[in-house]
Amino acid sequence: MMSGSTPGFAFRTTATDGHARAGVLSTAHGDVLTPTFMPVGTQGSVKTLTPAEVAATGARIVLGNGYHLWLRPGPELIAAHGGLHGFVHWPHAMLTDSGGFQAYSLGEQCKVDDDGLLFRSHLDGSRRALSPEESMRVQGLIGADIAMQLDVCPPAEASGAEVLRAVRRTTAWARRCLQAKRPEQALFGIVQGGTDVPTRLAHADELGALPFDGLALGGLSVGEPNALMHELLEAVAHRMDGARPRYLMGVGTPSDLLRGIRAGIDMFDCVMPTRNARNGQALCWAGKIVIKQARYRDDQQPLDSRCTCPACTEGYSRAYLRHLFMAGEILVLRLLSVHNLHFYGELVRRAREAIVENRFEAFCSASLSELGTGP
Amino acid sequence: MMSGSTPGFAFRTTATDGHARAGVLSTAHGDVLTPTFMPVGTQGSVKTLTPAEVAATGARIVLGNGYHLWLRPGPELIAAHGGLHGFVHWPHAMLTDSGGFQAYSLGEQCKVDDDGLLFRSHLDGSRRALSPEESMRVQGLIGADIAMQLDVCPPAEASGAEVLRAVRRTTAWARRCLQAKRPEQALFGIVQGGTDVPTRLAHADELGALPFDGLALGGLSVGEPNALMHELLEAVAHRMDGARPRYLMGVGTPSDLLRGIRAGIDMFDCVMPTRNARNGQALCWAGKIVIKQARYRDDQQPLDSRCTCPACTEGYSRAYLRHLFMAGEILVLRLLSVHNLHFYGELVRRAREAIVENRFEAFCSASLSELGTGP
């Protein structure tokens, strides 16, 4: 195994409990305690919230979206602002994804060959080419602390041959991204392999032999049964190089996070807490609240009486939040967003505490049972 | 003249400068320094902002909309929360309008007779009847510090006969509202009369003879030429009973506010600062900024370098705000809203300071000239 040597970037594990681990990810923009959840700021904004509000949920690292920021406002403009940190005024750590996943899912007429992706922008139909080198150039200009390699992310229904081709291409692009990366920017490799454990383990070893600063699991939560993902996590995560941070991309529900942490994952990102908020859903320990339901019409309780977030402690009742949602008022989208991110922040904070105190398994079982099948 | 005697409600003038006056409006929810601008919380929310953010712009009184709150969520639900103060968690003063103006403008098939308004709800088409007594019942349940009488607000193109009929009906409804009002809730009368000065003066005297706690000018900024409104203000405002607060309803631009204050007005409300914000317009002393314009694409300056609001002091550049607007991000609507309300808050604060220091005319002329024809 051969870790990266990006200046200012480091990872160390400070406690373990089973496969679960507590650690510290050090970046040029501060330390991030792991396990950690990264709120998603797709277009340079964690939707509806200010950077200070995001930080107050406990987040010390956010994710920016390479595809969206590449197309609009463009990496050169961001670079002229001193990078994404300066542009969006976020003082803590940041990670960008390669843009590949959104090029597949949002780009039109997307074609993949050995050189990269060819597609049309979903914004204006313009032709775009995303090679490993272009992704590194774009992410370099955006200037997050951590960049992600360009990878090939096959759909859940892909054949075994397709998955193997994706793995091979991802490895080839991994080498090209490492060649093209900026010395001061950390770079993570992305393990592919669908839900086949031996393929995943082989790819984890292959990428682990390269000087990446961290290793991610990609191509999960793309439509495969949730139980399959959990099995794969249990079999693979703890066998990825333990000296480097392990990042499970685009996942997931609170239960997914708990299972991921138990399997040895350190980092997560997902749009769920903010997207669900905008759909009127609040994640609570006692279960999900769908705020438009008539049962909340006269309910003077706060969203979650056990929660310490601003939405739950500054005097907003469920009835008022429901009224705002029914009336189409933006304030409720903010309040539910901050609540859901606070919930995720608390979840990883408590998980970390349990790991440090060597009681993670009990915490995890009790939490999974309390959360039930949802949210 | 005969002022109201609502317990806990009082108004006193502390300084005058020409017709302009500085005063203190005392309510059960604190003192409001006048001249004052009331941000509009149509549906129980000053759009996009929390109560604390609204208060931080300097506002100490907000307006709730009788029509909207009557239809949704309904005054009984609000009363069960301890009134609108408790429902929306706003600790300072509040005023509600009667619902009449929105019934005319939003309600469908609206008919007016001596008993009130008959119309269909714009939300569900249900038949609704708004009499003076029903308006007072609704506003009583909503429980703002100040209620407004139900009035008849003729359009700008109304004939002289229509205007006179509106005035007569408004006076009849004034008496009925005073009969029906809650003892603990202040009530303002609404002077009508179109742009005819003698009609306005006569109506101001007529209503001034009734025990209202304040007097408003209604039926302005309804489509008449702006200069006509200014002339009317100059001729009428200072001749409305000086012992009571004078409120110019639904007005207006920063220039309108300055002219209103010069004419002797104490209170204003308008959706402009928040509505313009949602359309991407920032009000600045140096002129209006339309944030989507290409000229701001690379502009690293804050919105207004002379402004002390969070949007201007927390590191957001014009280029970033433009990006957020082009990308449809809610954060920019918040930032422009808080900026515009802060601008209005500063405007009335400076106006008050100038009155107290006996230099209002110079301040007013300089400001009108700096603002130009806009914003």
Image (cartoon, coloured by chain):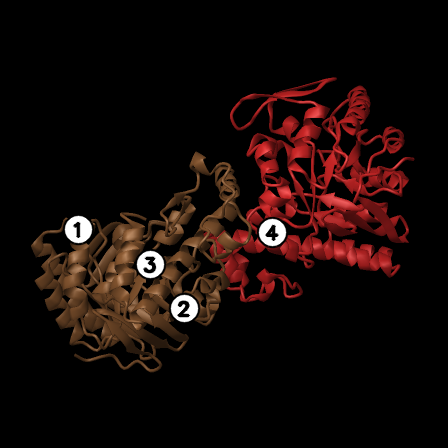
Chain colours: A brown, B red
Which amino acid type corresponds to the residue marked 2 in the rendered image? Arg
* Mark toward the viewer: 3 or 4: 4
Mark 3 falls within which chain?
A
Residue A67 is tagged as 3
Name the residue located 83 percent from the left edge and 59 percent from the top edge.
Answer: B354
Say which mark, if any, is on residue B51. Answer: 4
Q: Amino acid at mark 1?
A: Ala
Question: Residue A351's x, y, as percent?
Answer: 32, 65
Residue that badge 2 annotates: A60
Few, some or many C-alpha atoms within 10 Å of disc 4 (few <14, some 14-19, many ≥20)?
some
* Label 1 or label 2, whichever comes before in sequence order: 2
Decide if residue B290 is on the left or right side of residue A145.
right
Q: In the figure, residue A258 lies in which quadrant?
A: bottom left
Q: Position of residue A264 (x, y in %)?
A: 22, 67
Disc 3 crowd rating (10 Å Cα; few below 14, some 14-19, many 20+) is many
- Front label number (1 vs 2): 2
Label 1 chain ID: A
Q: Who's the residue at 85% across and 42% down the image?
A: B244
Question: From mark 2 to mark 4, how far is it between C-alphas?
Answer: 27 Å
Q: Are marks 4 and 1 in contact (CB under 8 Å)?
A: no
Q: Nearer the viewer, residue B366 or B102?
A: B102
Q: Quadrant of the N terminus of chain B?
A: top right
Disc 4/disc 1 C-alpha distance (Å): 46 Å
Q: Of discs 4 and 1, which sits in the foreground? A: 4
